[in-house]
Amino acid sequence: MRLEPVLEHLESLRFDDDDLRYLASLDLFDGSFLDVLGDLRFTGDVWAVPEGLPVFGDEPLLRVTALLAEAQLVETALLNRICYSSLVASNAAQLAVAARGKSVLEFGARRAHGPDGALTGARAALIGGCAATSNVAAGRRYDVAVSGTMAHAWVMAFASELESFRAYARAFPRNCVLLVDTYDTLGSGSPTRSRSRGSSPPPAAGCPGCGWTPATSRRWHASHAGCWTRPASPACRSWRPATWTRTPSRRWSRPRCPSTATASARRC
C-alpha cells in the first residue's frame, strides 16, 4: 500500500486561487460554496496497516474518519494511490516468496502506466519484496538499489549468444546478469550461459553419420542426469561423444543427433 503519498495528499489538501477561478468558470457552484472550498483542510483521522504488512482478503488496508465533505472529496484520490500500488506489491510479495531467498528484481517501467506509474510501481514492488529496480529514477528518488541485465539487442548484435555473453561478462565482471530468452531459453540460452561461465562439457567428436557436434547446433538436449537419447539411425546410434564432465551441481546428458526424426530414450 502506498501510505506515504496518501498522507502527503491529505496534509497538503487545499484549493488555491487558480483552482477556485477554474471552478467558478464552470458556472456550476455559487460563491458561498467556493468560499468553503477555499478554507477547506483535511481534519479527519487515518488508520492504516504498515506498508509491506501482509493482510487477509477483505481486510481494510486504510480507514478514514472525517466530515462527510472531506471524506467524499479525498475518496478518489486515496483509491488512486492505494489500489495500483497494492496490486504491484502483492504480486511482488508472491514472487519473492516463490523465489525462496533468491533476489527478485523490478523491471516494470516499460509496461507501467506512464512515467509516474513507473515510479509508483517500482516503489510498490520494493515494498512487496523486490531487492532492486531497473528504474534509475526510482533508485535515486527512493534511495534503493538499482540493477539491470543485458539487452536482447546486445545478444542479437553478435554472431552467437556465446560471444555476446562473454563480451558482456568482460564489460561487467562484477555485475553480470545474462538474458537467456532471446532465442530459445532451454534449447540455447541456458546452456550457452553455462558455457560462458566455463562450465561447458569438453568438445566432442562429430557424429560419423551426419557430422553433427554440439557446437554446430544450439540444441544441447541437457536433460536430467542418468538419461540419454538414442537416435533411430544405425550410423548415428553407434556414435558416442567424448565423456562429459559431471559435477554434483551441474550434470549433462549426451546430445541427440538431429539427423533422424524419431528417437527413443532409455536409462543409462
Image (cartoon, helix red, strand yellow):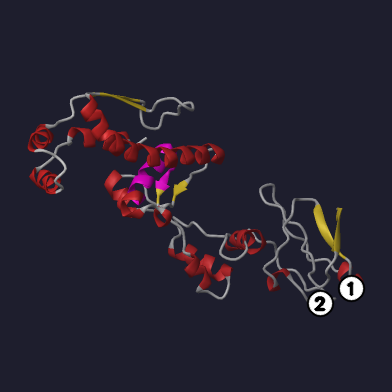
- Please provide percent x and percent y for residue 241: 79, 66
Side of 38 relative to 256 (left or right): left
Viewport quadrant of the N terminus: top left
What stretch of residues is rendered in magenta? 118-132
The amino acid beneath tag 1 is Ala
CB under 8 Å between discs 1 and 2? yes
Q: In which quarter of the image is residue 89?
A: top left
Mark 1 to mark 2 CA distance (whole Å): 8 Å
Tell me which residue sits at (72%, 56%) in the image: 252
Q: Which mark is residue 27?
A: none
The amino acid beneath tag 2 is Cys
Q: Name the residue under label 1.
A: 235
- Please provide percent x and percent y for residue 28: 16, 43
Q: In the depicted view, which residue is nearer to us: 33 or 123?
A: 33
Side of 241 relative to 22 (left or right): right
Side of 33 relative to 47 (left or right): left
Tell me which residue sits at (37%, 50%) in the image: 146
Q: Quadrant of residue 266?
A: bottom right
Q: In this view, does 86 lie above or below 68?
A: below
| Secondary structure beneath label 2 | loop
Tell me which residue sits at (74%, 54%) in the image: 223
Q: Quadrant of residue 100?
A: top right
Q: In this view, does 178 lie above or below 145?
A: below
| Secondary structure beneath label 1 | helix
Q: Mark 2 points at which residue?
A: 210
Q: Residue 78 colored magenta?
A: no
Q: Residue 120 colored magenta?
A: yes
- Please provide percent x and percent y for residue 237: 88, 67
Side of 156 relative to 1 (left or right): right
Tell me which residue sits at (81%, 53%) in the image: 227
